[in-house]
Image (spheres, helix red, strand yellow):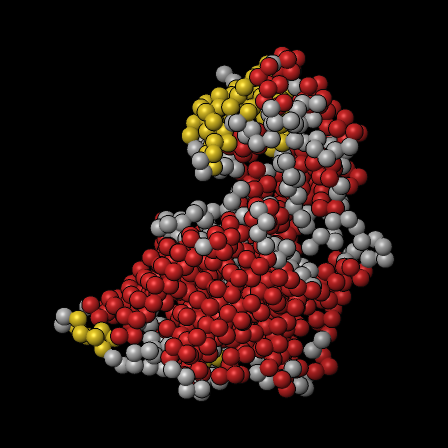
């Protein structure tokens, strides 16, 4: 049972990390980035290639994944966001769908169709906790996620740059009047979002297989986590992600692993019907 | 009983009170001016009445029925029509179609005869068109009836919004700065139009910055500042009121 | 597009004559049937995406429900094809209605993700409910449509059957668009708030549009099942939902003619570009980006701009 819960916590932590980067971009540009799942996938592949092809130690492979994805994030906002930034949000959404197809199929050409896996930082080490033994990788994932959430909170609350980004996300026009370079802040948001996606991608490698088409699965989960936590809320993604992860592992164990995604989706519908603002969120109805 | 009655009506955005415990009555058949400096809560008040925003507290009562909690379309069907400060044009619809949107009623089952193309559906459509054309003549947009709404010049877009509001056959018309961006000739047309709306039995609540227009057309004027009523009375009384002068002069966008 | 009636007549005549020169090529006829089938799907999506301006990525779900229900009704219940077609469309419409109720409560971007999730769930159910759907093995031997003694088994016959259904669907969709409900949908796309204060109930209008759209997508699914005779979950994936969206975009959102042209192009293009192999899908993704950036009004928008005399570009149209 404890093992099961830790397993769920680890998966939930990944969902939370993915969801967090997704929400940053949503708050900054007012539209969902459909290619976010593919950014996770590219990060995972970069990390795996770093380990397998280049023989890097795990920390160096992670650094490669994060830096490579950050560069991709910059390129992404330059090609997919910047040209359509003055158009309605729907335009960026469709462009990002196009980018997700582009990235997915590029990955298919580069890395092939076979799913890859890695033992991860901790290999197969198990930690004994009372009567159960728990994978050290899972504990690492949970720890890294909590640390990342803590760091990003400090960044946005305490640093000048973080506060400028926050101001941009809240009101671009006001931020511009305050002398903030809005397009640079948005570019940075995309870069950070891609970097955290790569972190999530690399951490998830020991838990699920990495494949070119994992993006869709990942983004749906991030979305459900965000709805549970509350639209646009960063603490909400942490709570929502972990809730979803634990719920999934438990339904897979006690009910059916084939239908765990169906349950996750039904949960989403239930929340939208009963408590559309989630646990922490703003109203989701159409704004005036 | 007043036609429209707001009692202790408030709307807060974060810590800021855009409308602050406002009591306001509009009597049937009058043209009421609603003025005040920028940010004094005029548009927010219209949003609360039309159901676009829910109030934080207080009540709005229209013909004895409380409006709070009703969706905007239901309030529109009760006879409250409005225009917007920034014209909300339906891109992709012609001028005539804009008026038709507000003229029609939407019972779900009426879709069936429409899809079957029955004679009844065609007759209803013809009747709606005839009525809409009449309204377009009233707002002097009949010549432009088949043009896309989005290509109209700014002043005509505002007239189109007035036409769309009139298509509801309203009891109360809320006009949000209808004269902004209008040229002289259009303002005169608007003035005559407002008087005509009243002469046909509707009540008008006019939010406006164009003081000559308000002062010449309104029966009574209410002045808001910081979401509160600071003066109310005939145009002459209001213009002499020291509190009004203070509110405007204090921020330098006076009633010229 | 000064005389839509003329354009439609020419298109219909073209569609009627199109297969005749290829009567001997099974391959070309197959592609033409798929063009007509996809046109039906694109017209369906156009109601939600073109009229309402909502990105819906779950139409694979309606398409799949239509296909499986139609197969079940003919193979297990022994119903004639015509009834199965109606039943399939009805089942899809009901699922559209059921999905619309929660989905329409949220803002546009979230609507996209919910519809996407719906499509995925339908696929997962088709994949895992093995006792009914036979999972990955799929359903084999969906019968050819029969109307009494008349059985449609040739590709040519199937082309005209699909064309007939498509023409009916387009006729109904155009009627919807020209009616008060169609105007209400465009009004909601323009400004939901102003539509509501003009007396339109946005939730109701969206619900009707979504149900109508799902109904057409369901008939497309039914026709697909009886044409292909074999259906499996891998046909009804996000890929077909995205393809339908791109068909509408490429043709020009809001235009049924555009949807038909877009469907034709995107069905034939992958065949013509087969030599590119896996590069095709990369270019396809890049193509979506380029279409959105450089021709947001699609081919119909370009045709409209070319069709107008020089210098007659009017104010307001330069605005993106």
Q: Judge whether A72 appears above or below B43 on screen.
A: below
Coordinates of residue A215 in the picture (x, y in percent): 46, 71
Question: In percent of the image, x 75 and y 62: which residue is there?
Answer: C302
Q: Is residue B45 left or right of residue C94?
A: right
Residue nearest the observer in this picture, C151 or C249 = C249
Q: Is residue A94 left or right of residue A120?
A: right
**In which quadrant of the rendered image does the C terminus of chain C lie?**
bottom right
Coordinates of residue C41 in the picture (x, y in percent): 57, 66
Residue nearest the observer in this picture, A37 or A48 = A48
Question: In percent of the image, x 32 and y 70: which residue is there?
Answer: A141
Coordinates of residue A118 in the picture (x, y in percent): 36, 82
Q: Judge whether C182 appears above or below B162 on screen.
A: below
Q: In this orientation, does residue A130 appear?
A: yes
Q: How many marks?
A: 0
Hey, which residue is sitting farthest right in the picture? C310
Q: Is residue A11 left or right of residue B241?
A: left
């Amino acid at each position: 049972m404890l093992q099961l819960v830790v397993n769920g916590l680890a998966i939930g932590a990944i969902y939370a990390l993915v969801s967090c980067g997704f929400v940053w971009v949503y708050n900054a540009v007012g539209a969902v980035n459909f290619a976010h799942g593919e950014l996770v996938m590219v990060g995972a592949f970069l990390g795996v290639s770093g380990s397998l092809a280049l023989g890097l130690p795990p920390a160096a492979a992670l650094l490669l994944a994060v830096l490579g994805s950050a560069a991709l994030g910059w390129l992404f906002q330059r090609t997919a966001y910047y040209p359509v930034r003055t158009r309605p949000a729907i335009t960026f959404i469709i462009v990002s769908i196009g980018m997700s197809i582009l990235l997915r199929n590029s990955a298919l050409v580069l890395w092939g169709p076979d799913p890859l896996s890695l033992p991860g930082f901790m290999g197969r080490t198990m930690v004994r906790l009372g009567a159960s033994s728990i994978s050290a990788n899972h504990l690492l994932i949970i720890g890294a996620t909590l640390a990342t959430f803590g760091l990003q909170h400090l960044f946005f609350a305490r640093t000048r740059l973080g506060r400028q980004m926050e101001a941009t996300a809240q009101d671009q026009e006001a931020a511009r009047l305050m002398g903030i370079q809005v397009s640079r802040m948005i570019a940075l948001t995309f870069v950070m979002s891609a970097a955290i996606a790569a972190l999530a991608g690399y951490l998830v490698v020991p838990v699920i297989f990495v494949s070119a088409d994992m993006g869709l699965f990942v983004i749906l989960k991030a979305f459900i986590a965000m709805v549970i936590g509350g639209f646009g809320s960063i603490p909400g993604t942490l709570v929502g992600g972990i809730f979803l992860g634990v719920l999934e592992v438990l339904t897979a164990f006690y009910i059916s692993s084939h239908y765990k995604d169906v349950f996750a989706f039904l949960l989403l519908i239930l929340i939208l019907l009963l408590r559309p603002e989630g646990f922490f969120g703003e109203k989701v109805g159409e704004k005036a | 009983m007043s036609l429209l009655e707001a009692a202790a009506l408030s709307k807060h955005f974060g810590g800021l009170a855009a409308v602050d415990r406002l009591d306001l009555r509009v009597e049937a058949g009058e043209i009421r001016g609603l003025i005040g400096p920028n940010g004094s809560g005029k548009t927010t008040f219209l949003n609360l009445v039309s159901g676009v925003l829910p109030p934080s507290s207080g009540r709005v009562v229209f013909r004895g029925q409380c409006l709070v909690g009703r969706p905007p379309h239901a309030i529109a069907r009760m006879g409250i029509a409005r225009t917007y400060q920034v014209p909300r044009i339906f891109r992709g619809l012609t001028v005539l179609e804009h008026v038709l949107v507000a003229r029609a009623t939407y019972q779900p089952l009426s879709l069936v005869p429409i899809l079957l193309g029955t004679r009844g559906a065609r007759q209803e459509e013809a009747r709606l068109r005839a009525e809409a054309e009449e309204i377009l003549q009233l707002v002097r947009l009949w010549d432009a009836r088949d043009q896309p709404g989005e290509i109209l010049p700014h002043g005509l877009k505002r007239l189109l919004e007035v036409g769309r509001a009139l298509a509801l056959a309203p009891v109360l018309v809320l006009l949000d700065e209808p004269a902004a961006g209008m040229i002289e000739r259009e303002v005169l047309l608007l003035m005559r139009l407002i008087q005509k709306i009243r002469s046909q039995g509707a009540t008008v609540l006019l939010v406006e910055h164009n003081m000559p227009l308000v002062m010449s057309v309104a029966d009574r004027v209410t002045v808001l500042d910081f979401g509160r009523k600071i003066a109310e009375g005939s145009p002459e009384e209001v213009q002499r009121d020291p509190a009004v002068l203070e509110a405007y002069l204090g921020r330098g966008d006076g009633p010229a | 597009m000064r005389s839509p009636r003329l354009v439609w007549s020419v298109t219909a005549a073209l569609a009627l004559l199109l297969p005749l020169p290829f009567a001997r090529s099974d391959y070309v006829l197959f592609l033409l049937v798929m063009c007509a089938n996809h046109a039906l799907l694109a017209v369906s999506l156009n109601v939600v995406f073109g009229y309402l301006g909502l990105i819906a990525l779950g139409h694979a779900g309606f398409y799949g429900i239509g296909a499986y229900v139609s197969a079940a009704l003919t193979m297990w219940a022994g119903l004639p094809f015509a009834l199965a077609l109606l039943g399939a469309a009805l089942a899809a419409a009901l699922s559209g209605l059921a999905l619309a109720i929660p989905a329409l409560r949220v803002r546009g971007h979230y609507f996209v993700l919910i519809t996407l999730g719906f499509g995925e769930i339908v696929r997962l159910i088709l994949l895992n409910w093995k006792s009914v759907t036979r999972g990955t093995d799929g359903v084999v031997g969906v019968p050819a449509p029969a109307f009494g003694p008349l059985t449609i088994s040739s590709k040519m016959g199937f082309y005209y059957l699909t064309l007939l259904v498509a023409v009916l669907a387009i006729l109904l969709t155009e009627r919807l668009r020209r009616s008060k409900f169609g105007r209400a949908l465009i009004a909601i796309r323009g400004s939901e708030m102003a539509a509501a204060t003009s007396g339109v109930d946005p939730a109701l209008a969206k619900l009707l549009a979504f149900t109508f759209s799902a109904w057409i997508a369901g008939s497309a699914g039914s026709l697909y099942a009886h044409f292909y005779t074999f259906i499996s979950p891998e046909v009804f994936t996000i890929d077909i939902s995205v393809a339908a969206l791109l068909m509408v975009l490429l043709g020009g959102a809001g235009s049924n003619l555009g949807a038909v042209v877009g469907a034709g192009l995107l069905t034939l293009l992958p065949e013509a570009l087969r030599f590119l192999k896996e590069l095709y899908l990369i270019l396809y993704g890049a193509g979506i980006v380029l279409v959105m950036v450089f021709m947001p009004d699609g081919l119909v928008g370009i045709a409209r701009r070319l069709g107008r005399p020089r210098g007659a570009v009017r104010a307001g149209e330069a605005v993106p």
